Image (cartoon, rainbow, N blue to C red):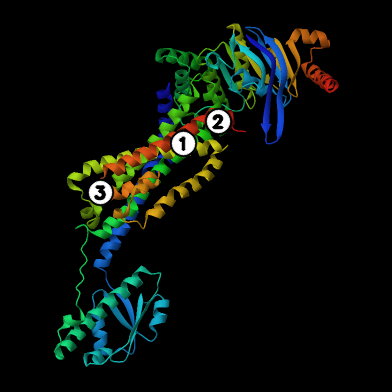
Amino acid sequence: MFWSVYKKEMLDSLRDRKTIILTIMIPIVMICAMVLFYENMLSGSNTAEGYRVAVADTFDEKSFEWLDELPNIEAFRSDDPEQAVNDGEAVAGLWADTGFLEQVMNGGTAEVKMTSDEGSMKGSEATSLLRRGLEALQETITADRLAAAGVDPLTIKPITITTVQLTDKDSNSLNFASILLPVLIIMSVMIGGQSSAVELFAGEKERKTMEALLMTPVSRGQLVLAKWLAIATLGFISGIFSVIGFAVIVSTMTELMKQALDFGSNGGRLLISALLCILLFSLLISAIQIIFSMLANSFKEAQTYFGPVMFIAMVPYILLMGVGVNELSTIHFLIPVMNTYALLKELVYGVFSIGNLVMTIISTAALVTVMYVIAAVMFSKDKWVLGK
Amino acid sequence: MIIADRLTKKFSRKKETVVAVNDVTFHLTKGSVVGLIGENGAGKTTLLRMIATLLEPSLGTLRVMGADALKDSHKVKSRIGVLFGGETGLYDRLTARENLEYFARLYNLGRHESEERIKRIAAQFGMKDYLDRKVGGFSKGMRQKVAIARTLIHDPELILFDEPTTGLDITSANIFRQLIHQLKREGKTIVFSSHIMEEVQLLCDTALLMHKGELVYQGSLEKLYEEEDSRDLNYIFMSRLVRGHKDVLERV
């Protein structure tokens, strides 16, 4: 009997165009758009056509040429560099004393001012490039001056600082994937089961098909179990599609991210961990969705409840955004939902920890049980099943 | 077939308690066609829902086909067919056949038995042409036929209809009336609520008259005609309600 109800719910849901779009299409489109956007951004910063920098008229020809030769900088003269930035003609503006290059080359000093729109990523990248160029110039001039004075340049630079990366993979790509993939999976699972959760409880209540169902000799326990698993299955399928979509897009359309996410022989167990994680989250979120769907008396009412649920599920994600993979601690793996984000983040970095996986499974399974019991108790009460 | 003893159903909404069915006692025999008559809000649907084991009585006892409706609801459910008016309770994205197969399965019918029943019912209701089409595109009459077919798929002994002809066109309503006659010939017990007195007069042999949750008459229609010295059920209904209401007021 359980199987008949489950099969019917799956058939009914998969015949709904809305479910297909939300379960399969949306995750793939979202992933495609975000991965390609980021890949473009990453590769764009390396091979950019050039940031337009407005330079004050006080720049002499020699200083202007030096500036224009800096990588990715496309300088042009302006009466008012600040205005040029405000008007969007330039991403950064630069002022300096007249003949500043000549001045500093001849042992003098000069002041250089920069500006950019603080909210603009291109602006901050352009000022960063300008700053690096000026610092390199400063180092060269300082070294020359010290050499001329017979002083070893290392006298003023006793410490050499070298940053060693924890991984030989592209850290920007890894960081982006660790931010993007967990939230995409979580959103996909939530969106994938949402439409059916609304249909199978609030929708059936509104259309009165629930009454017809409850008048059959099938126990309410079997009905709620079959419906719950059908919703969880759809959420799980959606989550799997988001992983498959991500893998296909990364391997076929990206270079940097593809290299960064090559897990080699570790891939198998990372994938199994991810699947377990998605499965448990699907079971958890579908039980929560059932509860909210039962609270509603109509399709529309249920949909209004689902917005805040999705927002709440995003809170742990926001809290974990600034936490590095090596900073994740036991507490992160003991709090349901947060542990899903944390574990997926770890997996993206190629870290497999059986302890963290077990903690995630146990704590999520405990909450799944609690939520399912609440849903089943609610389903046994006419007030929640039949509505007003 | 149905024995109700001091049956009461109360609903609590916020601080208010509404008594939908109040202290109702009746006895319906096997094979009778019972017309449940009353104004809107008289308690007809609540009474039908209690018989269908969809609602638990607040007070009193209810035995349906020898089983306690509260303690043995599983046994009762497998032997009754219920159709609430205006709501067909069908799944739009499934075909008529899939809807019927699904409910046949829920009523524990085997595949072969289910196929046979669907074939027979489809022929009986003239549903063959649209049996494999999705219900979402059906007219109200077609939907109602499928809903009735769903109600009868497991060959129930007791059938409950709540205002079954509401919204039906003349042809579909006539098909329904013919069906009631046929079910009566097959020895089924039928309880249906209706506003249409002519329909009750035409199809029923027994009447239950309800007013504001109370039963103001139970018995055969013939006896009612004799008592009122009239065969105009509309007139009888109105006069009984007025008297029933007075009785209630006097008791209060």
The residue beneath circle 1 is A371
Residue A138 location (% of width, % of height): 23, 83
Which chain is mark 1 on?
A: A
Which residue appears at 71% of the width and 34% of the height?
B16
Q: Are marks 2 and 1 in contact (CB under 8 Å)?
A: no
Residue A246, image x, y percentages: 29, 48
Question: Circle 3 sits in a helix, a strand or a loop, which is it?
Answer: loop
Mark 1–mark 3 distance (CA, rounded to whole Å): 30 Å
- Sequence-first tag of 2 and 3: 3
Disc tally is: 3
Q: Amino acid at mark 2?
A: Val
Q: Amino acid at mark 3?
A: Val
* Residue A20 coordinates in the image, percent (x, y): 40, 40
Residue B148 at x, y percent in the picture = 56, 20
Viewer-nearest residue: B10 or B137: B10
The residue beneath circle 3 is A351
The N terminus of chain B: image quadrant: top right
Near mark 2 (Cα within 10 A), the count class, few <14, some 14-19 or many ≥20, is many
- The amino acid sitting under disc 1 is Met
Q: Residues within 10 Å of mark 3 (few under 14, many from 20)?
A: some
Q: Is residue B28 above or below residue A122?
A: above
Foreground tag (2 vs 3):
3
Q: Which residue is mark 2?
A: A385
Nearest the viewer among B248 and A377 is A377
Q: Are marks 2 and 3 in contact (CB under 8 Å)?
A: no
The answer to whether any part of residue B62 appears in the image is: yes
Q: Are marks 2 and 3 on the same chain?
A: yes
C-alpha separation, residue under disc 2 versus residue under disc 3: 45 Å
* Badge 1 element: helix
Residue at 29%, 77% in the rendered image: A131
